[in-house]
Image (cartoon, rainbow, N blue to C red):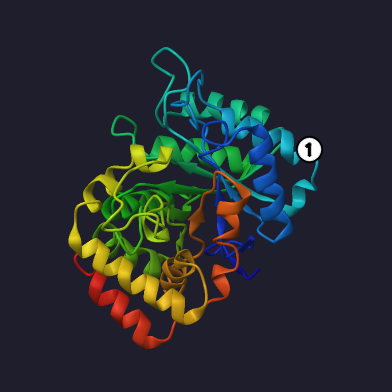
């Protein structure tokens, strides 16, 4: 497993990040433990979750993923795991039940710490913009958490470039902790949202980029073909991206290229899609998810694949419209 540093921080993280949205939803606790054990044994030390995962599962209320991680973490050396979680979504009733106000953050972080069974979070991230709360209030709350030792670093997710820059300016102006990472939606099949402006911002400001859905909800793994377009997995069923791609002939042209390059390299298609991302200087660690250990095995080792310039050029050209 290769490692890098999270932006300007001193945290050394694996080049792949284990996403845990499936935990407590499409992966039960036993499967989740097995996935984390295999990832950890492979040298993957960077785990990402969110307090709302996975409220949409039958009988769930949110916090299931964090609770499963917390029980697993008790069997490991906490210092060997870089743990990231998020705050923003609704977690309880009432006006303070969601958002990025200091009131919500104050209670939400304590709940996350309790579920995770730890006394600190390595990377605490806003899950999305809260239009009702000023950046300054959110950053002041985060700054207090860092000074209290409950959080080491903070990041953001799903922010447009102008909001990232505004938040960085507020941090600089008021001498507050700043966002050290960004989680954008980014893959070969979803490029424009990140590349239009965010990529340049992150490069210039030395912000670590941890893209989610790097395999386009499984589309890039080859499970879909022109002949088989059925959405048979929970993730694909809920994915708006898959809904857009499934009848787009350009997507299958890109899949054909992924398949050919993977065959030439002797690796799964997922490795090629992830290697394309990792070849970009701005990318820190794509977030990979799995419902089973077998799915995890398909992506482990992707950080070791180096694509040649011809393969990258071909993928760039075929994915340019996405």
Classify 297 as above or below 159: below
Classify 163 as above or below 305: above
Residue 148's x, y, as percent? 65, 38
Which quarter of the picture shows residue 99?
top left
Residue 314's x, y, as percent? 29, 80
Classify 321 as above or below 233: below
Q: How many marks?
A: 1
* Residue 171 horizontal side relative to residue 199, left or right: right
Disc 1 is placed on an element classified as loop
State the residue position of label 1: 74
User: Label 1: how many residues lie within 10 Å, few (<14), some (14-19) or many (20+)?
Assistant: few
Residue 56's x, y, as percent? 43, 26
Give the position of the N terminus as an image quadrant: bottom right
Residue 64's x, y, as percent? 58, 28
* Residue 199 horizontal side relative to residue 155, left or right: left
User: Is residue 306 visible in this depiction of the protein?
Assistant: no
Front residue (pair 314, 18): 314
Front residue (pair 153, 52): 52
């Amino acid at each position: 497993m290769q490692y890098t540093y999270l932006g300007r921080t001193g945290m050394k993280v694996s080049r792949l990040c284990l996403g845990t949205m499936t935990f407590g939803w499409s992966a039960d606790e036993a499967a989740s433990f097995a996935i984390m054990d295999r990832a950890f044994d492979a040298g993957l030390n960077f785990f990402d979750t969110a307090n709302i995962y996975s409220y949409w599962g039958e009988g769930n209320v949110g916090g299931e993923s964090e609770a499963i991680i917390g029980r697993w973490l008790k069997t490991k050396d906490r210092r060997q795991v870089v743990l990231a979680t998020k705050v923003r979504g609704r977690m309880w009733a009432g006006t303070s039940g969601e958002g990025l106000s200091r009131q919500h953050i104050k209670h939400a972080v304590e709940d996350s710490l309790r579920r995770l069974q730890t006394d600190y979070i390595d990377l605490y991230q806003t899950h999305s913009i809260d239009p009702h709360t000023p950046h300054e209030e959110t950053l002041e709350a985060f700054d207090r958490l860092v000074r209290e030792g409950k959080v080491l670093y903070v990041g953001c997710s799903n922010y447009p470039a102008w909001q990232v820059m505004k938040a960085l300016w507020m941090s600089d102006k008021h001498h507050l902790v700043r966002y050290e990472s960004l989680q954008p939606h980014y893959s070969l099949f979803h490029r424009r949202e990140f590349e239009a402006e965010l990529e340049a911002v992150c490069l210039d400001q030395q912000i670590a980029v941890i893209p989610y859905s790097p395999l386009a909800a499984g589309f890039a793994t080859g499970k879909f073909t022109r002949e088989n377009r059925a959405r048979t997995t929970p993730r694909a069923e809920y994915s708006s991206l898959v809904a857009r791609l499934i009848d787009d002939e350009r997507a299958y042209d890109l899949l054909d290229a992924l398949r050919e390059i993977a065959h030439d390299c002797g690796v799964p298609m997922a490795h090629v899609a992830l290697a394309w991302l990792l070849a970009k200087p701005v990318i820190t660690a794509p977030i990979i998810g799995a419902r089973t250990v077998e799915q995890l095995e398909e992506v482990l080792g992707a950080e070791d694949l180096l694509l040649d310039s011809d393969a990258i050029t071909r993928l760039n050209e075929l994915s340019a419209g996405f």
